Image (cartoon, rainbow, N blue to C red):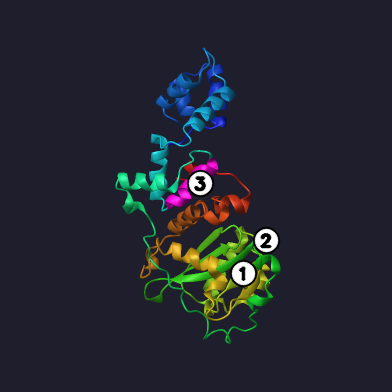
């Protein structure tokens, strides 16, 4: 667990508790920090004998800005924690700059990794990814399929949320399936485990996914697991489109996400050992991971219009 910094809200809480006569240990218990953290906060940011949340926060921000180009101990701990979450040095640099935590070059971070023998934490190590062949044998067998060429312009141009690309990844001996759905704009990802790869089972997962998430369109490959797309559309209102055969790049957003997911759930994994809790945690991690294509924002931030402190996701 990475060190969490006091926020302005925390400081207002401290200020009010001090006015009520609380001592350091009691304040620490109330705000969920250590007694040492509270003592250090008061030592650094008191003005005379009084403590003001606003002044304390300005002092903190000023000190943080002066250290903006430095690999402080706190920044080092954060970098290590993010590397352990499988976040690349490039994404770490971009996200730290975005949050105003540190303005570091990729070289500085990579030198830190080499100096401290942390290369084993690096995620992708030059492996090439081969697109799978998809859909030729089933393209003519899926009744009433609507080709991707008829998909709305807003979906094609990535100008609007809620247009998803979907696929399944399969378990050992082709038993079990995990549905992956990725928003084309925000890269917000939905995961769902199905008992098998039949169209009925996949639809059950899609029904549940659409119940908690807005999905306007879904673009699939020509796999037989999506053969009951008309039932899906009738029940949920989702408009379903199908990519051309042998054209995985038409669903490149989803293909890239599946590549990433396979680092956590490798090929040959027995899906009976994958719990719904594990899948839920993986989904949370994926949606809290900054992305270069999102200007180092996370899918959650783009999809829901919120702002997240990256340290709170570790």
150 above or below 262?
below
Question: Position of 155 compared to 73: left or right?
Answer: right
38 above or below 237?
above
N-terminal label among 1 and 3: 3
Q: Position of residue 293 (x, y in %)?
A: 55, 57
Q: Nearer the viewer, residue 220 or 291?
A: 291
The residue tagged with tag 3: helix, strand or loop?
A: helix
Please give the label number shown on residue 110: none
Q: Position of residue 264 (x, y in %)?
A: 40, 60
Question: Which segment is the magenta one?
Answer: 87-99
143 above or below 131?
below
Q: Nearer the viewer, residue 145 or 23?
A: 145
Name the residue that disc number 3 marks: 95
Name the residue that disc number 1 marks: 218
Name the residue that disc number 2 marks: 159
Question: Viewer-nearest of labels 1 and 3?
Answer: 3
Residue 92 located within the stretch drawn in magenta = yes
């Amino acid at each position: 667990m990475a060190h969490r910094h006091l926020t302005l809200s925390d400081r207002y809480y401290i200020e009010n508790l001090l006015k009520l006569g609380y001592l350091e240990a009691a304040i620490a218990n109330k705000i969920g920090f250590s007694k040492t953290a509270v003592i250090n906060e008061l030592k650094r940011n008191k003005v005379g004998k009084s403590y003001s949340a606003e002044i304390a926060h300005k002092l903190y921000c000023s000190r943080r800005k002066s250290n903006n180009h430095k690999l402080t101990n706190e920044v080092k701990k954060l970098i290590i924690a993010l590397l352990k979450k499988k976040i690349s040095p490039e994404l770490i640099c971009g996200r730290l700059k975005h949050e105003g935590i540190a303005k570091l070059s990729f070289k500085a971070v990579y030198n830190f990794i080499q100096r401290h023998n942390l290369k084993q934490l690096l995620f992708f190590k030059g492996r090439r990814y081969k697109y799978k062949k998809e859909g030729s044998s089933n393209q003519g067998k899926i009744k009433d399929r609507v080709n991707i060429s008829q998909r709305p312009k807003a979906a094609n141009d990535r100008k609007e949320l809620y247009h998803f690309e979907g696929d399944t990844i399969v378990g050992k001996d082709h038993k079990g399936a995990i549905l992956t759905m990725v928003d084309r704009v925000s890269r917000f990802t939905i995961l769902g485990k199905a008992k098998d790869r039949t169209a009925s089972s996949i639809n059950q997962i899609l029904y549940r996914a659409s119940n908690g998430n807005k999905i306007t369109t879904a673009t699939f490959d020509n796999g037989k697991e999506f053969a009951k797309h008309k039932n899906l559309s009738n029940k949920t209102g989702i408009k379903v489109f199908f990519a051309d055969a042998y054209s995985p790049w038409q669903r490149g957003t989803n293909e890239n996400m599946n590549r990433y997911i396979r680092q956590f759930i490798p090929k040959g994994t027995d899906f009976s050992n994958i719990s719904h809790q594990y899948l839920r945690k993986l989904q949370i991690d994926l949606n809290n991971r900054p992305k270069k294509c999102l200007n180092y924002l996370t899918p959650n931030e783009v999809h829901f219009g919120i702002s997240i402190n990256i340290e709170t996701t570790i």
